[in-house]
């Protein structure tokens, strides 16, 4: 089981430079853990791309359906209060955005406060540095 950040999930549904790496990681361990608000981030990314690339609207709407379908098979961290407490500490400790701190907070909940027990999948270098300092093993970076 691995915790997946939005930056690692997007390449699973939209072709990007990191798509093949994300697909290999998913095949190696299909047990995906996500933060409950990751879904909003994913849908927002697709909506933004549809606005920027109207010619890709059909493909991006299919990707949206794919996310909603896959979401049903993923383990979702919904403990908002606990995640928020972790994230509040994380933003004081690391130079990261609030959304990234919430992702790390959710991963800490998933790991039951023992980051060494859970791998964290991200393609965001700044977040990866914070995640490593929190004690997680980062996968995703080449």
Image: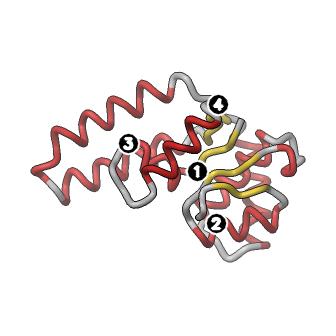
Marks 4/1: CA–CA distance: 13 Å
Marks 2 and 1: CB-CB under 8 Å? yes
**Which is more N-terminal, label 4 or label 3?**
3
User: Viewed as shown, does residue 74 lie left or right of 120?
Assistant: left
Where disc 2 sits, the SS reads helix
Nearer the observer: mark 4 or 1; the answer is 4
Q: What crowding class fits label 4: few (fewer than 14 Cα within 10 Å), some (14-19), or many (20 or more)? A: some
Marks 2/4: CA–CA distance: 21 Å
| Residue beneath disc 1 | 5
Q: What crowding class fits label 2: few (fewer than 14 Cα within 10 Å), some (14-19), or many (20 or more)? A: many
Q: What crowding class fits label 3: few (fewer than 14 Cα within 10 Å), some (14-19), or many (20 or more)? A: many
Marks 3/2: CA–CA distance: 21 Å
Q: Residue at the spot x=73%, y=52% of the render? A: 105
User: Viewed as shown, does residue 42 lie left or right of 85?
Assistant: left
**Which is more N-terminal, label 2 or label 3?**
3
**Which is more N-terminal, label 4 or label 2?**
4
| Residue beneath disc 3 | 13
Q: Residue at the spot x=61%, y=60% of the render? A: 100
Q: What crowding class fits label 1: few (fewer than 14 Cα within 10 Å), some (14-19), or many (20 or more)? A: many
**How far across and how far down the image is residue 115, in percent?**
84, 51
In what quadrant of the picture does the C terminus appear? bottom right
**How far across and how far down the image is residue 72, in percent?**
51, 22
Marks 3/4: CA–CA distance: 17 Å
Q: Nearer the viewer, residue 140 or 62?
A: 140
**How far across and how far down the image is residue 52, in percent?**
19, 60
Q: Residue at the spot x=38%, y=42% of the render? A: 13
Q: Nearer the viewer, residue 120 or 23?
A: 23
Nearer the observer: mark 2 or 4; the answer is 4
| Residue beneath disc 2 | 127
| Residue beneath disc 4 | 31
**Which is more N-terminal, label 1 or label 2?**
1
**How far across and how far down the image is residue 11, in percent?**
42, 50
């Amino acid at each position: 089981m691995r915790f997946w950040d939005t930056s690692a999930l997007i390449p699973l549904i939209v072709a990007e430079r990191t798509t093949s790496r994300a697909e290999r990681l998913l095949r190696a361990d299909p047990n995906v853990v996500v933060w409950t608000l990751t879904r909003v981030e994913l849908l927002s990314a697709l909506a933004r791309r549809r606005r920027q690339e109207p010619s890709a609207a059909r493909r991006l709407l299919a990707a949206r359906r794919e996310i909603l379908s896959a979401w049903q098979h993923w383990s979702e961290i919904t403990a908002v209060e606990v995640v928020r407490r972790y994230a509040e500490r994380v933003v004081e400790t690391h130079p990261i955005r609030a959304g990234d701190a919430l992702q790390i907070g959710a991963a800490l909940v998933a790991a039951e406060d023992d980051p060494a027990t859970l791998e964290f999948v991200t393609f965001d270098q700044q977040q990866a540095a914070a995640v490593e300092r929190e004690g997680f093993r980062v996968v995703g970076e080449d």
